[in-house]
Image (tube, rainbow, N blue to C red):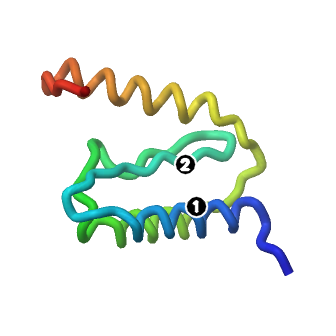
Amino acid sequence: MEASPPDQSQGEMALALDGLYSRDTFNVITFSGEYHILFFEPVPATPETAQGKKFLASRKSEGGTEMMKAIRAALEFRQMHRTIFRITVS
């Protein structure tokens, strides 16, 4: 039996989190009608990856797959941090 698309994508994201190195940073933005951001800013991969997995597991599909809201949120989030914290992104 194959997994449903939401279950499959959650599993793939968990694998991606497992593949992060300790020097990596990450954040999780989910979308399903509305978007949800896990952390206020990207965090080091260890031990926060466990929080990322719990966050993913807690999300339930609410029907919509409108990615644009989540993409805009990610871009606005990045711009906000560049402005507020004067982070140089290369």
Position above or below: 26 against 16: above
What is the distance, in whole Å, between disc 1 and disc 2 at their CAs?
8 Å
Mark 2 and mark 1 in contact (Cβ < 8 Å)? yes
Q: Amino acid at mark 2?
A: Thr
In the picture, the disc for residue 87 is none
Q: Residue furthest bottom?
A: 1
Of marks 1 and 2, which one's residue comes earlier in the chain? 2
Q: Is residue 24 left or right of residue 55?
A: left
User: Residue 83: where, in percent of width, then height?
Assistant: 21, 18
Q: Is residue 74 left or right of residue 78?
A: right
Q: Is residue 8 left or right of residue 71?
A: right
Q: Amino acid at mark 1?
A: Arg
Dividing the image into 4 quarters, which one contains the N terminus?
Answer: bottom right
**Residue at the image position 24 percent from the left and 52 percent from the top:** 43
The residue where tag 2 is placed is 30
41 or 60: nearer the eye?
A: 41
Please tell me how crowded label 2 is: few (under 14), some (14-19), or many (20+) other residues with Cα within 10 Å: many
Q: Residue furthest right?
A: 1
Q: Is residue 69 left or right of residue 43?
A: right
**Residue at the image position 82 percent from the left and 75 percent from the top:** 2
Please tell me how crowded label 1 is: few (under 14), some (14-19), or many (20+) other residues with Cα within 10 Å: some
Indicate the quadrant where residue 89 lies: top left
User: Residue 64: where, in percent of width, then height?
Assistant: 75, 43
**Mark 1 falls on what kind of element?**
loop
User: Residue 17: where, in percent of width, then height?
Assistant: 42, 64
**Residue at the image position 43 percent from the left and 45 percent from the top:** 37
Q: Residue furthest top?
A: 83
**Residue at the image position 27 percent from the left and 61 percent from the top:** 45
In the picture, the disc for residue 59 is 1
